[in-house]
Image (cartoon, rainbow, N blue to C red):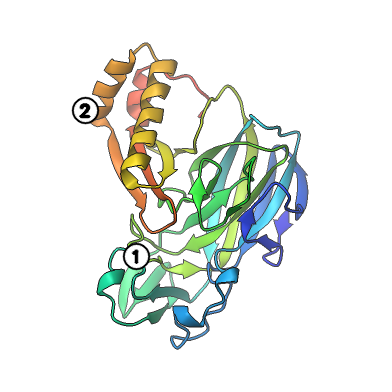
Amino acid sequence: MLIKREKHVFAMDKENTPAVKASLPCQLTFETLDCFSGQIKSENNTIETLDFSRVNPATGPAYLDGIKNGDVLAIQIDDIRVQSPGVMVAAPKAGILGPLVQKSETLLVPIENDKAYFKGIDLPLKPMIGVLGVAPAGEKIDCGTPNRHGGNMDTTLITAGSILYLPVQVDGALLALGDLHAVMGDGEIMVSGVEVAGEVDLTVSKAENLIINNPLLKTEDELVFIASATTLDEAVAIATNDAAEFLARETELTFTEAGMLMSACGNAEISQIVDPLKTARFTMPLRILHKLGVKLAL
């Protein structure tokens, strides 16, 4: 089922009108605008020229029949196809380096043959999804902000071949996505990755026997606990605690033993440090989890 990019929202909201309705399991293709809604046509279009009410559109939402508050979605990312050119921006006071930026600049980044060309430097494409989320139970949350509903997590591991698990807060979930990047480094320190429009193929199903409070990601090699908070320290603490509680619940390790194992072979990592809430992750090797006898259908 195709969801055209013309059907998009700027906030995750339980009041959003569904673009489509689907029964699980289902295969969905989302066409997306770039994070600037296509407003940047040339390098003369700087941040000051943008209509910020049109920033960070998410295509959708999709209403998923039979999904209820308290369920967990399993979102398998089958493919991400990006369009050329990509766009990057910089501006004073924006991002970690913003205080040192003297004037706004925009860069168009051609994409060809699975590479992005930054000022002639070829960067292998690593397409990923910046915004992927469901509607929160309470007040609406703009698409630029991450939280336990997902949203703008800007996590480089949310890419083809990964499965994202999201806790559902409202009936039907109201799944939406956008903000694709052709390539981006952890942190997204200069406000943007290589921002692109494109298409994403998903296979969506209901996850059984899985208890999570925040987004959880399974890659080929790792289980990734994702959390967002006001500060990076808080986000790291939440992600780490989620991982320890998972291990203590799903294995024979005590909480303390789980923490020691995590300290030996897990990694606390940064996803992004530019959004209204910061996002961190804690990763554990699947090889270790399998040795511990984790039986979840992940």
CA–CA distance between discs 1 and 2?
32 Å
Q: Quadrant of residue 44?
A: bottom left
Name the residue: 55% across, 64% down. Answer: 56
Give the amino acid type for the residue marked by disc 1 in the picture: Gly
Q: Could you say where residue 231 lies in the image, as x and y percent from the top left?
A: 35, 47
Categorize mark 1 by other alpha carbons within 10 Å: few (<14), some (14-19), many (20+). Answer: many
Looking at marks 1 and 2 on the same chain, the residue that comes earlier in the sequence is marked by: 1
Q: In the rendered image of this protein, does residue 158 appear above or below residue 172?
A: below
**Residue sitting farthest toward the left:** 264
Q: Could you say where residue 240 lies in the image, as x and y percent from the top left?
A: 34, 32
In terms of secondary structure, where does tag 2 sit?
Answer: helix
Q: Residue under circle 1?
A: 95
Viewer-proximal residue, 269 or 54? Answer: 54
Q: Could you say where residue 294 lies in the image, as x and y percent from the top left?
A: 43, 20
Q: Is residue 31 in sight in this rendering?
A: yes
Q: Is residue 219 in sight in this rendering?
A: no
Q: Which mark is residue 264?
A: 2
Q: In the rendered image of this protein, does residue 222 appear above or below residue 130?
A: above
**Residue sitting farthest toward the bottom:** 44
Tag in front: 1 or 2: 1
Proximity of marks 1 and 2: CB atoms separated by less than 8 Å: no
Name the residue: 36% across, 60% down. Answer: 188
Q: Quadrant of residue 66?
A: top right
